[in-house]
Image (cartoon, rainbow, N blue to C red):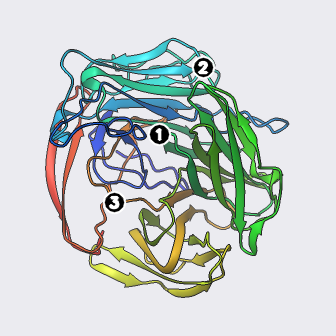
């Protein structure tokens, strides 16, 4: 049995039945923490470093916290797990027992904890619909987080490497009707995020989280269809220590039809998540979060784009030079041309949306090549005319060279099991991928898959 409410769209990933963990390639970058990402390498040649702690940041309720804007209390739940040893070949594990915790921030006590690899901890956020009930009645389910603005997931000692976490929510009726899921990530200095539009009733909320002990200043700028959006509103946004700040993009531009957001932090690191929420009059048209896309480059790949009906590709040119952009889809049978606009010119500093409507229903990767660096993302919709619907964003990702994964638990309020799809893409060369899944007891199952060059 799978949950598929009509019009709710999402491209997700494979899982074992029930609560479990999947390790494999996916469209959410930075989902697994193998150790500190910004610490200098002080080892001598031939030496190895044993990771003893790692942390991921979960943004918390993304539809709350913008001053003078209505909050939407959806049932956000955080899930976390440490990858089974099978998926960590070549990684040195610290001796002794470790633990994995989900902690409400700032300053709350841990709300959920596990001490075994492959086990999934869950903690619903207090104050949201459906919060407080353990998911599936599993012994790893935690108590509600006591009103946090965000959550930290931490692994210590033997459970430090391979930490993965995500938050999710599901509302099946009313104006908030949608399925939302976003991977918890590591903070960075710079991010590019693609989502949103200029239609009436469409709002984009940028959630900036600072896990550090000092306040961070953040500049948020925007590129649009006609070029850089000139506005001082997003400059010098202060994100306090161990706190988060939410920004409505309408304060920078409320009419931009194809926004692409550039986030630059000064004095520290932040995580950035962009929510696209669309209420078409009184009809819910969907909501989804997007995480930072891969850094600007001349070759971008957007995996896990599940097309059934309307879809579009968004490409932005951060530099000043006009850029020739070539795009194609990668299928199970190899590369295929787009229905139209497979080669376009995009002016420097601008954004171009390319209509993908006309692609046969299926799950693709989209490859974008350009003669100057670009950033890219794609949106799919499930909507029949003016009826209620949903939307989903996928962003370009870098190559997965070690391990990536995600814990998968049913969102609070799900009337039954949730179906998931794992999409694997290889560009340039044939690739062999080991997919490791765990069940609710932490038992790991492995299978090796071959992915031909330039295919999904």
* 288 vs 272, nearest the viewer: 272
Q: Residues within 10 Å of mark 3 (few under 14, many from 20)?
A: some
Up the image or down, 288 lies above or below 242; here it is below
* 102 vs 212, nearest the viewer: 212
Up the image or down, 375 lies above or below 189; here it is below
Apparent side of residue 122 relative to residue 207 in the rendered image (left or right): left
Q: Which residue is mark 2?
A: 106
Looking at the image, do the residues carrying marks 2 and 3 touch, with CB atoms under 8 Å apart?
no
Looking at the image, do the residues carrying marks 1 and 2 touch, with CB atoms under 8 Å apart?
no
Apparent side of residue 175 relative to residue 366 in the rendered image (left or right): right
Apparent side of residue 209 relative to residue 83 in the rendered image (left or right): right
Quick one: SS at disc 1? loop
Alpha-carbon distance for marks 1 and 2? 17 Å
* 40 vs 253, nearest the viewer: 40
Between discs 1 and 2, the one toward the N terminus: 2
Coordinates of residue 402 in the picture (x, y in percent): 26, 49
Q: Which residue is mark 1?
A: 186
Coordinates of residue 89 in the picture (x, y in percent): 15, 41
Residue found at the far top of this picture: 109
Looking at the image, do the residues carrying marks 1 and 3 touch, with CB atoms under 8 Å apart?
no
The quarter of the picture where residue 196 lies is: bottom right
Quick one: SS at disc 3? loop
Q: Residues within 10 Å of mark 1 (few under 14, many from 20)?
A: many
Between discs 1 and 3, the one toward the N terminus: 1
Between discs 2 and 3, the one toward the N terminus: 2
The total number of labels drawn is 3
Quick one: SS at disc 2? loop
Q: Which residue is mark 3?
A: 399
């Amino acid at each position: 049995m799978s949950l598929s409410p009509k019009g709710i769209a999402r491209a997700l990933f494979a899982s074992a039945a029930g609560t479990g963990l999947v390790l494999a390639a996916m469209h959410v970058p930075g989902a697994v923490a193998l150790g500190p990402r910004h610490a200098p390498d002080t080892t001598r040649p031939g030496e190895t470093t044993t990771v003893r702690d790692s942390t991921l940041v979960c943004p918390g309720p993304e539809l709350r916290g913008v001053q003078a804007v209505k909050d939407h209390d959806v049932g956000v739940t955080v899930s976390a797990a440490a990858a089974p040893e099978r998926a960590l070949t070549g990684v040195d594990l610290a001796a002794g027992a470790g633990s994995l915790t989900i902690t409400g921030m700032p300053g709350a006590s841990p709300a959920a904890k596990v001490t075994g690899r492959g086990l999934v901890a869950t903690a619903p956020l207090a104050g949201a619909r459906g919060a407080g009930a353990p998911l599936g009645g599993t012994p790893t389910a935690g108590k509600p987080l006591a009103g946090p603005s965000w959550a930290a997931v931490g692994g210590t000692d033997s459970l430090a490497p391979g930490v993965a976490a995500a938050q999710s929510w599901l509302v099946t009726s009313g104006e908030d009707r949608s399925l939302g899921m976003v991977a918890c990530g590591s903070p960075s200095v710079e991010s590019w995020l693609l989502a949103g539009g200029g239609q009436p009733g469409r709002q984009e909320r940028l959630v900036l989280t600072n896990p550090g002990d000092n306040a961070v200043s953040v500049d948020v700028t925007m590129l649009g269809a006609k070029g850089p959006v000139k506005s001082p509103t997003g400059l010098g946004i202060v994100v306090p220590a161990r706190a988060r700040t939410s920004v409505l993009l309408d304060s920078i531009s409320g009419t931009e039809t194809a926004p692409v957001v550039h986030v630059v932090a000064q004095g520290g690191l932040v995580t950035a998540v962009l929510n696209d929420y669309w209420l078409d009059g009184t009809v819910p048209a969907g909501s989804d979060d997007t995480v930072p896309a891969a850094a600007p480059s001349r070759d971008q790949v957007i995996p896990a784009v599940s097309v059934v009906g309307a879809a579009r590709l968004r490409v932005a040119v951060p530099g000043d030079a006009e850029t020739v952009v070539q795009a194609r889809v990668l299928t199970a049978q190899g590369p295929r041309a787009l229905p139209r606009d497979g080669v376009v010119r995009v002016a420097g500093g601008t954004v171009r949306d390319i209509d993908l409507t006309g692609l046969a229903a299926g799950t693709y990767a989209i490859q974008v090549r350009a003669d100057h660096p670009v950033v890219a993302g794609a949106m799919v919709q499930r909507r029949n005319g003016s009826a209620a619907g949903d939307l989903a964003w996928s962003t370009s990702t870098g190559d997965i060279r070690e391990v990536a994964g995600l814990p998968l638990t049913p969102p609070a309020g799900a009337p039954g099991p949730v179906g998931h799809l794992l999409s694997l893409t290889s560009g340039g060369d044939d690739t062999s991928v080991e997919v490791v899944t765990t069940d609710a007891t932490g038992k790991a199952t492995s299978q090796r898959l071959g992915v031909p060059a330039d295919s999904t």
